[in-house]
Image: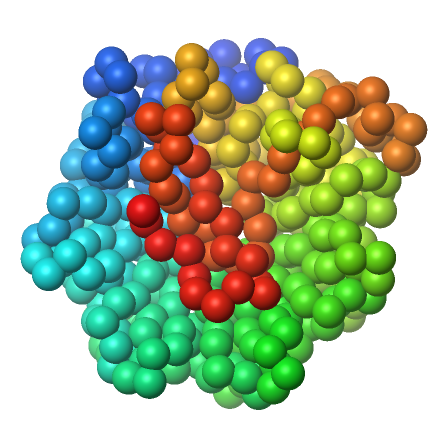
């Protein structure tokens, strides 16, 4: 577990009420470059992305110093997660320019995880044991969710009756979440348990849903369409899907991560801006400008929320405390006073593309036909 003293060294004064810069600011990128903190482990190691002014993206690890993780022979790479041992999962270009899921064991080179018979694959999550998940091309041109122990072949997790699936996260027990197509083409959040297969987690009354993360105690989070065709963040407690968006009361919301305490983070959309939300101890909090993160990627056991601020038209890796003060909302009227907010991430497929000469999230809708790719 990350000690408070280590957190203070890494993130500066943890008691500050606004979003924290990493220490040094960002991930050690040079002037003109952008950065995003993607995930953090208990040792304070941060998996991240740096984008150069040219648009080239580099997979990096911050471990008291900046460590470049390289590629699989191509030009670009990005990270998606890190486990307690410092193993990193992500996606990198190979010498043919194809995107391939990788696992980089601590101190070792990247390992290409291969595909399911097609040309590309994407790494999305990794657990303490080094088991990795993501999605990969099949020989017939569809993407399928996969799991692997990081050293063996990819295992196709199947679908919910359709042709497409994507895995987004895995916990210490090997339980996997993501999104899979039904036979009618609509997509649903799924929970896959070893030996039990894939379970449809349902919706909040709408047609589609998607899961983004799962905690070690089995809490699943993501987003679901509602009966009135809005998107609401949800938390599935193992028995039912709980509508977190209803607690916000207005706009579209998307949960991106959950920690062992069941604290959920994500973002809300109203108009054309972004704000972070934290659901903690039964209380929903939405952070106005200057108090929260612009991009929200993860939350760890030490209550550090990981992502980025938007500074001078560029993203800069940063963190905030889940308990920091902000505007607390209990219904639509409270949120109206916040102004506009945009989507940070949703639907389980969260990758990155060039935008504003910096890094921006690319979100793949569960109703789309292809997963998001680097552009």
Q: Position of residue 179 (x, y in %)?
A: 55, 68
Task: Tell how many labels.
Answer: 0
Q: Depth check: 154 or 230 in front?
A: 230
Which residue is rendered at x = 40% and y = 74% of the image? 143
Q: Is residue 12 above or below residue 107?
A: above
Q: Is residue 283 above or below residue 132?
A: above
Which residue is rendered at x = 30% and y = 53% of the image? 90
Q: Position of residue 148 (x, y in %)?
A: 32, 73
Query: Residue 9 appears in which quarter of the rendering?
Result: top left
Left or right: residue 120 versus residue 161 is left
Query: Residue 96 appears in which quarter of the rendering?
Result: bottom left
Camera sees residue 165: yes
Left or right: residue 16 versus residue 235 is left
Camera sees residue 321: no
Q: Position of residue 373 (x, y in %)?
A: 36, 54
Q: Position of residue 26 (x, y in %)?
A: 35, 21
Q: Quadrant of the N terminus?
A: top left
Q: Depth check: 126 or 164 in front?
A: 164
Which residue is rendered at x = 42% and y = 13% of the image? 312
Q: Is residue 343 above or below residue 211?
A: above
Left or right: residue 282 versus residue 92 is right
Which residue is rendered at x = 12% and y = 51% of the image? 74
> Which colour scheme appears in the figure?
rainbow
């Amino acid at each position: 577990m990350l000690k408070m003293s280590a957190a203070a060294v890494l993130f500066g004064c943890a008691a500050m009420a606004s979003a924290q810069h990493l220490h040094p600011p960002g991930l050690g990128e040079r002037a003109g470059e952008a950065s995003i903190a993607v995930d953090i482990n208990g040792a304070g190691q941060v998996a991240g992305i740096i984008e150069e002014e040219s648009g080239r993206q580099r997979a990096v690890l911050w471990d008291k110093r900046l460590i470049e993780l390289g590629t699989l022979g191509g030009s670009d790479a990005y990270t998606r997660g890190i486990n307690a041992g410092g193993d990193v999962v992500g996606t990198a270009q190979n010498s043919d320019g194809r995107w391939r899921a990788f696992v980089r064991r601590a101190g070792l080179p990247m390992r290409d995880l291969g595909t399911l018979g097609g040309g590309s694959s994407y790494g999305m999550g990794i657990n303490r044991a080094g088991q990795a998940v993501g999605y990969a091309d099949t020989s017939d041109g569809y993407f399928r969710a996969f799991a692997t122990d990081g050293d063996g072949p990819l295992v196709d997790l199947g679908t919910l009756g359709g042709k497409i699936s994507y895995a987004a996260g895995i916990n210490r027990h090997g339980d996997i979440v993501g999104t899979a197509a039904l036979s009618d083409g609509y997509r649903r959040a799924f929970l896959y348990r070893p030996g039990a297969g894939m379970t449809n987690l349902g919706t909040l009354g709408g047609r589609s849903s998607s899961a983004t993360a799962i905690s070690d105690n089995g809490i699943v989070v993501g987003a679901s369409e509602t009966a009135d065709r809005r998107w609401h963040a949800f938390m599935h407690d193992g028995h039912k899907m709980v509508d977190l968006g209803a607690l916000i009361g207005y706009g579209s919301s998307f949960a991106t991560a959950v920690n062992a305490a069941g604290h959920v983070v994500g973002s809300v959309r109203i108009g054309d801006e972004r704000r972070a939300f934290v659901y903690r101890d039964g209380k929903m909090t939405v952070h106005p400008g200057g108090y929260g993160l612009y991009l929200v990627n993860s939350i760890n056991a030490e209550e550090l929320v990981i992502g980025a601020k938007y500074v001078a038209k560029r993203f800069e890796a940063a963190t905030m405390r889940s308990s920091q003060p902000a505007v607390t909302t209990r219904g639509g009227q409270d949120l109206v006073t916040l102004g506009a907010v945009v989507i940070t991430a949703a639907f389980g497929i969260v990758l990155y593309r060039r935008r504003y000469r910096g890094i921006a999230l690319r979100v793949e809708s569960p109703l789309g036909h292809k997963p998001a790719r680097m552009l």
